[in-house]
């Protein structure tokens, strides 16, 4: 099973994130004003999703890469098996959980595209 979420505010206007086989688990609005930076809204909409198809990681990652806004370094991440998948607009990182060098590469990329350092905090 793959579970993840995408922030509604991170999607490009007109973009759709709708890979085959995803189910919505929950939608929630969260006051994130303490963490938000200039250009980010203070409240975020978390759309939690899941799928039973572990083979869908590639198509899900590509759909996110196509749908995310390139500004402000928005990203989404999820785990499939022992892999962590971190997705930015147009770029996908996949690595074994615990691989610090690969994680550092994804973090460096996030910083280069404007993700605030304190938001590059995905779980391993």
Image: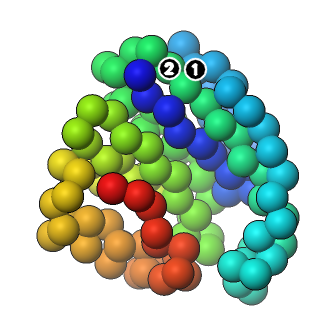
Q: Is residue 53 visible?
A: yes
Q: Position of residue 32 (x, y in %)?
A: 77, 70
In this rendering, would 111 be left or right of 42?
left
**Quarter occupied by the N terminus:** top left
Q: Position of residue 17 (x, y in %)?
A: 63, 34
**Quarter occupied by the C terminus:** bottom left
Task: Say which label, 1 or 2, has the lower sequence index.
Answer: 1
Question: Which residue is rendered at x = 31% and y = 20% of the image?
Answer: 55
Identify whether 28 is placed above or below 32: above
Identify whether 43 is placed above or below 28: below
Q: Position of residue 80 (x, y in %)?
A: 33, 34
Q: Position of residue 74 (x, y in %)?
A: 58, 64
Identify whether 15 is placed above or below 33: above
Q: Which residue is mark 2?
A: 51
| Secondary structure under the numbered disc 2 in the rendered image | strand
Q: Is residue 114 visible?
A: no
Q: CA distance from mark 1 to mark 2?
A: 5 Å
Looking at the image, which is closer to me, 12 or 78? 78
| Secondary structure under the numbered disc 1 in the rendered image | loop
Q: Which residue is mark 1?
A: 22
Other-residue count near label 1 (Cα within 10 Å), few / some / many at <14 / 14–19 / ≥20: some
Looking at the image, which is closer to me, 1 or 88? 1
Question: Which residue is rendered at x = 76% and y = 43% of the image?
Answer: 14
């Amino acid at each position: 099973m793959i579970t993840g979420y995408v922030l509604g505010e991170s999607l490009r206007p007109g973009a759709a994130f709708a890979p085959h086989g995803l189910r919505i688990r929950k939608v929630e609005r969260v006051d994130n004003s303490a963490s938000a930076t200039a250009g980010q809204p203070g409240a975020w909409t978390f759309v939690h999703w899941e799928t039973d198809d572990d083979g869908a990681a590639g198509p899900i990652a590509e759909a996110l890469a196509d749908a995310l806004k390139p500004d402000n370094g928005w990203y989404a991440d999820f785990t499939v098996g022992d892999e962590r998948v971190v997705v930015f607009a147009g770029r996908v990182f996949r690595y074994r959980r615990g691989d610090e060098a690969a994680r550092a590469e994804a973090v460096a990329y996030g910083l280069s595209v404007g993700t605030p350092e304190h938001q590059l905090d995905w779980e391993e």
